[in-house]
Image (cartoon, rainbow, N blue to C red):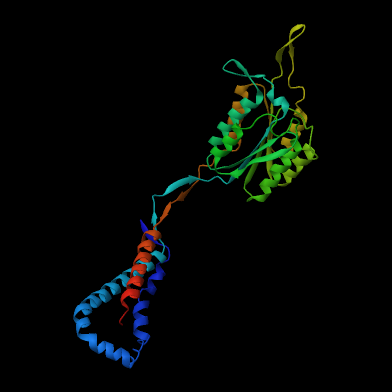
Amino acid sequence: MLQFEWPWIALLLPLPWLIRLLVPARPETIPSALEITILDDLRDSLQNSFAPRSLRSRRWRRFAALLAWLLLILATARPVWLGEAIDIPASGRDLMLAVDLSGSMQTRDFRVNDRPVDRLTVAKQVAAEFIRRRVGDRVGLILFGLNAYLQAPLTLDRETTAHLLEEAEIGLAGKETAIGEAIGLAVKKFREGPKNSRALILLTDGANTAGVVAPLKAAQLAADAGVKIYAIGVGADEMTVRTLFGTQKVNPSTDLDEKVLTEMADLTHGRYFRAKETSRLEEIYRLLDELEPVSRETQAHRPTTALFFWLLIPALLLGMVVLIDYQRHGTNR
């Protein structure tokens, strides 16, 4: 459907006619004696040869000027083409994912298709699928190790956020684990935006070993800001390793501080999850879909296409042609 955003501009259409009606014509200059003599000698020849052409030129020029004015008015009225209405999901929920990139995330105690895989690879794969499912949510990404870094701000562009997560590598943010710094950065970014439903999904395999902010202190700040923390502790509790004395079973998750992670979640009315294998991690993210459901509400949006340049360009071209013709042949009222 065609629509003009500024239709009142049409009130300016009679402006050239009003100017012609109200502004007096420019008086003709009195020619000098020399000019009279020259005109007397050439009057007959010029009158027959150029008068018809001049008359045609004036008529064409007037028509072109009026057409240019009409096109200019229509372009100024800002015509747009409205497309078909599109329903856009809108939940008003902000989700921030904080993913641990410390050195211990390279432990290969998860399995995918019966092959050993490191923790980060599984975490990236499962979390990226979760991000893509969050239609209508604003999703951000924080990567943390020795320090915490905002990799993706809260955005509706879920595909870009998922892609940035898939590109994350172990050690990118340092080898240690700054859980408190990650929570503090998330709270800061939440506070910079509108006060929507806020949730932080924090995935780690260790304890806080870096940073100046204690995890429980950061969790209190999150609670004050209305941010729920869903903490996920990853890592198997049993793993077979080879040693000089043969193979033996060890616990690769001895550094995981489940007590602090649970306290952080409880303090913010969130929840703590333990993921010892790939299937359990996938189940946790499905549970998060239930705890923080995607809204079914939609907002209608009609895409618009601006059309003013299709009128403005010919108006300017016609105006240039009229000006050139005026300079060459002069004008008569």
Which residue appears at 69% of the width and 20% of the height?
Answer: 236
The location of residue 193, given as percent across then percent down, is 64, 50
The location of residue 27, given as percent across then percent down, is 35, 89
Which quadrant of the figure has residue 162?
top right
Looking at the rendering, in which quadrant would you find the N terminus?
bottom left
Image position of 188 with respect to 256: above or below: below
Q: In this rendered view, identify the residue nearer to me: 19 or 32.
A: 32
Which residue appears at 62% of the width and 48% of the height?
Answer: 196
Which quadrant of the figure has residue 204?
top right
The location of residue 121, given as percent across then percent down, is 62, 26
Q: Is residue 74 left or right of residue 114?
A: left
Image position of 45 with respect to 76: above or below: below
Q: In this rendered view, identify the residue nearer to me: 64 or 259.
A: 64
Which quadrant of the figure has residue 138?
top right
Q: Is residue 41 left or right of residue 24?
A: left
Question: How many discs mark residues in the rendered view?
Answer: 0
